[in-house]
Amino acid sequence: DDKTIKITDFGFAVNSNLNRVTMYNGTPLYMAPEVLLKKPYDGRIADIYQIGIMLYILVIGQFPF
């Protein structure tokens, strides 16, 4: 009713109570640098990075890198 867009994909979902995630699945063009380097990472921050990549593609029409 409020025209809010929600995007979900639970294909690689993990427990968000973990301090650092060590799961390195996904599409490389959308991954945060720390995920590509296979270092433990904060999943929330990596998700924000990936959302930024998706928004950039939606607005500009091409990948940022």
Image (cartoon, rainbow, N blue to C red):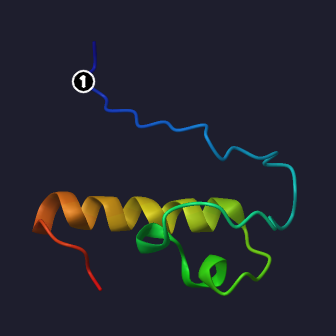
Q: Nearer the viewer, residue 12 or 43?
A: 12
Quarter location, residue 41: bottom right
Q: Residues within 10 Å of mark 1 (few under 14, many from 20)?
A: few
Point 31% across, 32% down: residue: 5
Point 49% across, 64% down: residue: 27
Position of 30 with respect to 34 (left or right) is left
What is the secondary structure assignment of the residue under circle 1?
Answer: loop
Quarter of the N terminus within the rendering: top left
Q: Where does residue 12 sit, x and y in percent of width and height?
A: 66, 47
Position of 6 with respect to 3 (left or right) is right
Q: Where does residue 43 sit, x and y in percent of width and height?
A: 69, 61
Name the residue that disc number 1 marks: 3
Quarter of the C terminus within the rendering: bottom left
Residue type at numbered disc 1:
Lys
- Tell me if residue 56 comes above or below residue 7 in the rendering: below
Point 72% across, 81% down: residue: 38
- Tell me if residue 21 comes above or below residue 35 in the rendering: above
Given the current orientation, which residue lies at the most extreme right position? 18
Position of 9 with respect to 36 (left or right) is left
Point 12% across, 69% down: residue: 60
Q: Nearer the viewer, residue 11 or 2?
A: 11
Total tally of numbered discs in the picture: 1
Q: Nearer the viewer, residue 32 or 42?
A: 32
Q: Where does residue 7 sit, x and y in percent of width and height?
A: 41, 37
Given the current orientation, which residue lies at the most extreme top position? 1
